[in-house]
Amino acid sequence: ELSDHSDAPRSEPVPVDPRQLLEQVIDTHRSRARSKGLQLDLLHESPVPPMIVTDPFRLQQALGRVLENAVWFTDAGRVTIRLSVAIEPRGEDADPRPRLAIVIEDTGRGMSREQIDRALLGQVAEAHAGDAGDAADGQVGLGLRIARSFVHALGAELRIDSAPGRGSTVTILLEFGD
C-alpha cells in the first residue's frame, strides 16, 4: 500500500514566490533534459501574484514528480511549463475564483486514459507496459500517484490530459486567494 504522504514533513503554509519555487524545481531537471536533447521552457502566460501562501515542501514535491515524468517519458522535443492565473466558477451561484495554474506539457509518449487511471491508483507495474516495459517505467509512473497525493494535501487539483503518441499535459490548480 502506498502512503498518502500525510506523514510527510510538513512546513506551515508560508508566503512563497511561485516563479522562484518553479525555477528551483526546473533547475533540478535541467541537466537530465539537456542530456536527452530536450528543450525545457518556462513561460509566464499572465501576471501571477508575486507571493502565494502555500506549503512549499508539498508543492515542490508535486511539481518535481510531474516534471520528472515529463522529462523521463519524452525522448525528443520539449517540455514546457506554463505559469498563469486561471479563473473558474465555483458553482452556479458563486463568484469565479482565481487559481494559480501550473501546466506541464511534453511531447513524449503519452498515455491512454486506462494507463493514467492505473498509474493514479498505484498500479504502476502495468501503467506503462507496452511502452518501454522496463522497471524504470514503473518507478517513474509512481510519480503521478505521489504527485496527486501532494496536490490533494495542498487542497489543489491535478488534471491530466494525454493520449498515446501525443504527449501529456498535467495541470495543477492551486487556490491563492478569493
Image: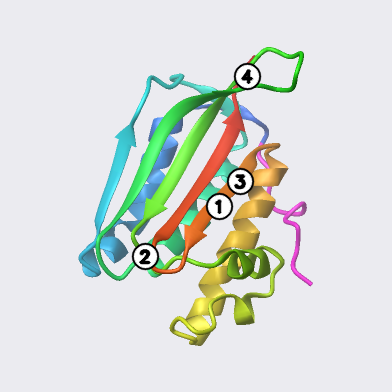
Q: Which residue is mark 1?
A: 160
Task: Give the extent of the magenta segment.
Answer: 1-11
Counting from the top left corner in percent of width and height, residue 54 is at 61, 31
Q: Nearer the viewer, mark 1 or mark 3?
A: 1
40 and 106: which is toward the camera: 106
128 and 93: which is toward the camera: 93
Residue 76 visible at all = yes
Does 117 appear above or below 78? below
Disc 1 vs disc 2: Cβ atoms closer than 8 Å?
no
Q: Within the image, what quadrant is residue 151 found in?
A: top right
As shown in the figure, which amino acid type bears the numbered disc 2?
Answer: Gly
- 63 to the left or right of 119: left
Residues packed near mark 1 inside 10 Å, few (<14), some (14 to 19) or many (20 plus) = some
Which callout, 1 or 2, points at the residue further toward the start of the chain?
2
Which callout, 3 or 4, points at the residue further toward the start of the chain?
4
- 132 to the left or right of 34: right
> Whole-Å distance between the Cαs marked 1 and 4?
21 Å
Q: Which residue is mark 4?
A: 97
